[in-house]
Image (tube, grey):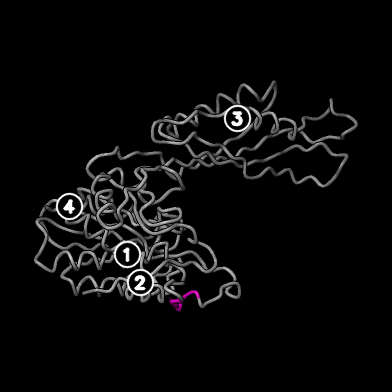
Amino acid sequence: MIDPVTLARDLIRCPSVTPEEGGALNLLQTTLEGMGFKCQRLVFAEEGTPDVDNLYARLGESAPNFCFAGHTDVVPVGARDAWSVDPFAAEIQDGILFGRGASDMKGAIAAFAAAIKRFTEDGPPPGSISLLITGDEEGPSVNGTKKMLQWMVENGEAMDVCIVGEPTNPMALGEMMKIGRRGSLNGWLTIKGEQGHTAYPHLADNAAHRIVDLLRAITAAPIDEGSEFFQPSTLQISTIDIGNPTTNVIPGEARATFNIRFNDLHSSASLTDWLHKTFDAAIGEGGRYELDIVVSGESFLTPPGQLSDLVSDACEKVLGQRPELSTTGGTSDARFIKDYCPVAEFGLISQTMHKVDERTAVEDIRKLSEIYEAVLRGYFQ
């Protein structure tokens, strides 16, 4: 048998700070090959981004293919002297496992492996089980899951359903499952005015005044009131930059950045159209603006049904409660997987992910592994 806590500790001891592999994929591959998995390492590169090592592992050759997805890369530890423990020592204190990646998400990956090992002790599954593990989730997400999925299509690898092991529970294991995520759109707005003297405003075009008008136009009212499974979309201005230290100079250029987290009432295309129409109406005579947009993911929803029922039934069996079906939080690699098969996210508690002294309860790792095993038994019954 595989002890999920021991494996989680071994994974944490691999300093796989994105985009470094750090030995984590090597360890996982060795573990999975010992279970009979066929493993393939997929290294992808793109100009301007770091090369990334990824792992696809499959046990079995027939359909259906149940996939567990996740990432072994972790965010930097920050100031090491702020930690009460070595962030890569995987210390256990009073039943709590400390270390970078404990909750996000090496604990879940260890739970994957241990659950599969127990499930297959009586024989191979009537289908296949796979793991889609990237080293690029915490990075730019260019050379990881997105390209792995393209590789799968090119090589005839299909998933029928997928669980992503992101930490989804706010305070206690079993509270929340993600069945969708909001989309994320980033905008860079630049106003082109004309510099001048503050005593002679008629000879200038104040970019600061114009950018205030445009930002007021997109923040004056809520974008929407939410939908059945989603919160209202939100727009947050993250910075306004004019760079003018002089009190008697009218600025000729002003810049702002903003982020929109949007629900399933919108797409990035519809929001881009709304932004241009709103800015065109607000800019005023003679005004000029430039708008650059980058979309990190569209909103999506896996409607409640077989997959969410599988996870909910497993949680009820192991923990005695059914999780809330949610679409809150940020983005994850599920935004790529949703184009290939139904996907849901369920993992550990999210309270300390990316924080100093990231940690998870040892018992939660064990219970999570039991839940994953119950999901497999329910799916392949």
Residue 156 at least partly seen: no
Name the residue type under label 1: Ile
Name the residue type under label 4: Gly
- Horizontal and vertical percent position of residue 277: 55, 24
Q: Which mark is residue 109?
A: 1
Mark 2 near mark 4, Cβ–Cβ under 8 Å? no
Please tell me how crowded label 3 is: few (under 14), some (14-19), or many (20+) other residues with Cα within 10 Å. Answer: some
Name the residue type under label 3: Ile
- What is the magenta segment's predominant secondary structure? loop
Quote the CA–CA distance across marks 4 and 3: 47 Å
Quote the CA–CA distance across marks 3 and 2: 45 Å
Q: Earlier in the sequence, mark 1 or mark 4?
A: 1
Q: Earlier in the sequence, mark 4 or mark 3?
A: 3
Please tell me how crowded label 1 is: few (under 14), some (14-19), or many (20+) other residues with Cα within 10 Å. Answer: many
* Circle nearer the viewer, 1 or 4: 4
Above or below for 264 versus 43: above
Q: Which mark is residue 10?
A: none
Quote the CA–CA distance across marks 1 and 4: 20 Å
Q: Earlier in the sequence, mark 3 or mark 2?
A: 2
Quote the CA–CA distance across marks 2 and 4: 25 Å
- Horizontal and vertical percent position of residue 124: 10, 63
Quadrant in which the N terminus is drawn: bottom left
Q: Which mark is residue 8?
A: 2
Q: Kindly identify which residue carries mark 4.
A: 378
Q: Earlier in the sequence, mark 2 or mark 4?
A: 2
Q: Kindly identify which residue carries mark 3.
A: 218
Q: Which quadrant of the structure image shows residue 125?
A: bottom left
Quote the CA–CA distance across marks 3 and 1: 41 Å
- Residue 95 within the segment the image draws in magenta: no
Q: Earlier in the sequence, mark 3 or mark 1?
A: 1
Asked which secondary structure carries label 1, the reply is helix
* Circle nearer the viewer, 3 or 1: 1
